[in-house]
Image (cartoon, rainbow, N blue to C red):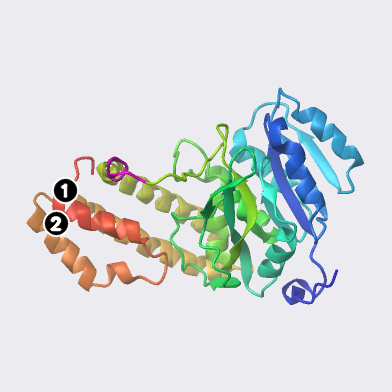
Amino acid sequence: MSCAWASGVGGQCPRVSIAMTTYNGARFLREQIATLEAQTLRPYQVVIADDGSTDGTLAILEETATSPLNIVVLRNERRLGYRQNFMEAMAHCTGDLVQFCDQDDLWESTKLEEMAAAVSVPGVMMAFHDATLVGVDGQPIGALGEGAGRGIVLHDPLSLDIWNSSLGFSIMFRRELLDYSRFWAGSIDKLKPTERASHDDWVFFLALVLGKIAHVDKPLVRYRIHETNTMGWRHTRRTLSDFLVVYRDSGQKLNQRINVVRNRIGILEEIAAEGGKKAGAVEAGLAAFRAHLALNERRLDMYRRRGAPARGVELTRMVFGGAYSAKQLPLSRSEIMRDFAVAAFGVKDA
């Protein structure tokens, strides 16, 4: 096939490695592999890391010996969990670009081609796309993302909210991000701080600092929702009680965000100490994350003030001081609305 769009990777079709993990995924695995075999841009390599499956997964993986794809199967001697298992699969990828893959989805046939075109845009380090939500029978039940057909939407370095990273199945990235994998051991997960960062959040963090991120505004995967999803996607309407639970945990969530930002600053400091060709981007990232930390510490101070008038005064100062209009690492609309709610009604756990 022609890869005239590949100027950012030398003008030739890029070699794309797929990093897939499996764990008791026999129910849907054959369907997923079939959609990999049907890609218009054939993957250079498919690395599948199994985390100790006890169903029929291993038998299906043995069948891949006859696949037209170059499939490498890794079998863990002990359970690693999905975070470390994905890191293990990534470490064995040798292509120019790396695409994450779950064990239970259905890929559209042009997914690799369209994603590789996005990541091949000069300066782009990572791309993500929209998805169609489907049930166990593969029939549509909803959508993830607008899918408005705007093509490739580019986001400058540090211009996205660090808390709203993309889901792993949609992410493709340049292999050079793997050069920083040794720093992953010191990371903490944004949702479960006793664990290391999830693979997708880790790649998003690095890409956000080191280059542009591209959004392919098109559903390229049928993302299957079922009872055994590791990280499912909510597709029902939120109720008032849902919002009250989110609001009630505002102080806890903000403290959690602050701890993650401090963690990422520490990692960037370690990377900066080693220098390298991305030193300028890392220093810019450090400055942005330190400013973001200061903003969130100021938010926490507002949360802790007693009485709506005192909180309202501080919130007003933040609004007119430009705290909510930052161009780098901006807060999401939901976070801003959370601050207005806390200012008005207070919160107990800050």
- Residue 327 figure quarter: bottom left
Q: Amino acid at mark 1?
A: Gly
Q: Residue at x 18, y 68 (%)?
A: 317
Which quadrant is home to the N terminus?
A: bottom right
Residue 316 appears at what percent x and percent y? 17, 66
Q: Secondary structure at mark 2?
A: helix
Q: How many marks can you see?
A: 2
Residue 154 appears at what percent x and percent y? 56, 72
Mark 1 packing: few (<14 Cα in 10 Å), some, or many (20+)? many
Tell me the CA gap for discs 1 and 2: 8 Å
User: Magenta span: helix, strand or loop, mainly?
Assistant: helix
Q: Are marks 1 and 2 in contact (CB under 8 Å)?
A: yes
Left or right: 194 as drawn, with respect to 173: left
Query: Which stretch is magenta?
Result: 238-243
Residue 165 appears at what percent x and percent y? 50, 55
Left or right: 84 as drawn, with respect to 6: left
Left or right: 158 as drawn, with respect to 180: left
Q: Which mark is residue 193?
A: none
Residue pointed to by mark 1: 346
- Residue 296 figure quarter: bottom left
Which quadrant is home to the C terminus?
A: top left
The answer to whether residue 256 is visible is: yes
Q: Which mark is residue 311?
A: 2
The answer to whether residue 183 is visible is: no
